[in-house]
């Protein structure tokens, strides 16, 4: 009886674990996601609302109002990009101590990934280029959307 219970627990644990995304996938649908190292996880609702889980905290963006065209992008274990579908592009950055900062285009000093630029509408892409002319990369291709299943 015990081996069957142990096996069932392993199956349930594997089924409930956040989905690891291969690099470069844009998130446009509901699901549970995590960077490859699983240092945090992302819960996305069907309407685009999301929560970031970093033990022992849960972070949300109360001013996040997703519209048609919204997406999220896990660049790596330290960077999560969010676009509201209209005009707002943000990056969440994890510090080594676990703190999370959210930066808009005017305060972020890094490079916008080409995958993110390629997924943006042309008008927003031009806004990024104008606000960050020496930082933004040319998109190489528009990446496919990810619609995970649980």
Image (tube, grey):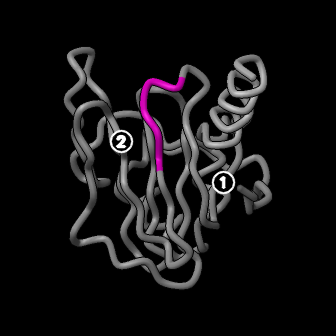
Helix or strand or loop: what does disc 2 sit on?
A: strand
Q: Position of residue 97 (x, y in %)?
A: 20, 16
Q: Quadrant of residue 24?
A: top right
Outermost bottom residue = 68
Q: Earlier in the sequence, mark 2 or mark 1?
A: 1
Q: Position of residue 112 (x, y in %)?
A: 49, 43
Please identify the dominant SS of the magenta region: loop
118 w.r.t. 121: above or below: above
Name the residue carrying label 1.
26
Between 53 and 129, the residue placed more toward the observer is 53
Q: Is residue 39 magenta?
A: yes
Residue bounds of the magenta highlight:
38-42
Helix or strand or loop: what does disc 1 sit on?
A: strand
144 w.r.t. 8: above or below: below
- The residue shown at (43%, 77%) is 66
Number of marks in picture: 2
């Amino acid at each position: 009886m015990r081996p069957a219970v142990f096996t069932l627990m392993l199956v349930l644990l594997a089924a409930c674990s956040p989905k690891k995304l291969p690099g470069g996938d844009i998130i446009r649908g509901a699901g549970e996601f995590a960077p490859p190292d699983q240092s945090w996880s992302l819960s996305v609702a069907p309407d685009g609302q999301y929560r970031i889980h970093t033990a022992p905290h849960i972070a949300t963006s109360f001013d996040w109002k997703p519209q048609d065209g919204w997406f999220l992008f896990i660049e790596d274990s330290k960077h999560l990009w969010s676009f509201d579908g209209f005009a707002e592009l943000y990056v969440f950055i994890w510090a080594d101590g676990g703190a999370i900062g959210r930066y808009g285009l005017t305060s972020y000093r890094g490079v916008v990934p080409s995958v993110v630029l390629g997924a943006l509408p042309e008008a927003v892409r031009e806004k990024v280029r104008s606000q960050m002319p020496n930082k933004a990369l040319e998109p190489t291709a528009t990446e496919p959307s990810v619609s995970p299943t649980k």
